Amino acid sequence: MDLQRLLSLTRKAVDDYHMIQEGDRIAVGISGGKDSLTLLCALNALKRFYPAPFELVPVCVDLGFADRDASAFEALSAFTADMGLELHVVRSQIAEVVFDIRKESNPCSLCAKLRKGAFNTRAKELGCNKIAYAHHRNDFIETFLMSLIFEGRVGCFSPVSYLDRMELTLIRPLMYVEESDVVAFTRAHALPVMKNPCPADGNTRREEMKRMVSDLNKTYHGVSERMFGAILRGDLKGWPKTDD
């Protein structure tokens, strides 16, 4: 995927759901993974010509894994500096709390809660009014399936959400971008992707959903496109209306 295609899909999401307004200061969650780095590239390119001027503030929450190489954060910092942006790293002991103290058998939920709390708090400290997550189209489909299968309800996280307690607006500008395109963009532009040190990586419910969708697509060609279309047309709870 080239930058022009990535920009086109990102701008469509931003315009369809009115994600960005003039004067916004947006904290972009940078995990070091392919998705968040692609999101930062997309928003930084969009910022150059978007009619509503906005600022970007990349924020990375260091979960505190002992085996994470410090040079990886240096590479991330250099990557954002090349864009003219300062990377803000939030140090934490989340890994110790989740795996050593609590010894969670299903660690993802607690880890996500603590990570989001640390990120949101730092975003507020940095004067941001919005935060951006790098969920792409596949994430929407997988979340929809998890909601249906494990909770017995039809739902999915929204492209735009207002977090009342933190007074922050959460946006997901990569919602129209497929994961395969993120992978292609990452490789084409040699983004400095950090290896995920989490011991639960690759063994989560989301990974199960990813494999399920892949298997369904092999049997029923185009099923993921139809599922995403159903999400967009589903009038789901918490979703904003589009102009069309």
Image (cartoon, helix red, strand yellow):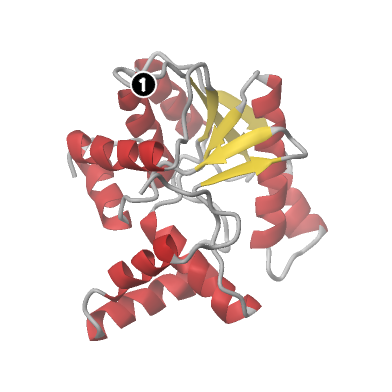
| Residue drawn at point x = 49 percent, y = 73 percent | 145
Q: Within 10 Å of the Cα at label 1, are there few (<14), some (14-19), or many (20+) other Cα atoms?
A: some
On screen, residue 108 versus residue 84, left or right, reads right
Q: How many marks overall?
A: 1
> Which of 171 and 186 lies nearest the eye of the viewer?
171
Quadrant holding the N terminus: top left
Q: Quadrant of residue 130?
A: top right
Q: Position of residue 126 (x, y in %)?
A: 65, 19
On screen, residue 117 versus residue 55, left or right, reads right
Residue placed under numbered mark 1 in the picture: 47
> Which of 204 and 147 lies nearest the eye of the viewer?
147
On screen, residue 180 versus residue 202, left or right, reads left
Q: Position of residue 197 (x, y in %)?
A: 53, 51
* Residue 77 in view here: yes
| Residue drawn at point x = 42 percent, y = 16 percent | 53
* Residue 63 in view here: no
| Residue drawn at point x = 21 percent, y = 78 percent | 221
Q: Position of residue 96 (x, y in %)?
A: 74, 50
| Residue drawn at point x = 74 percent, y = 35 percent | 166
Q: Quadrant of residue 157?
A: bottom right
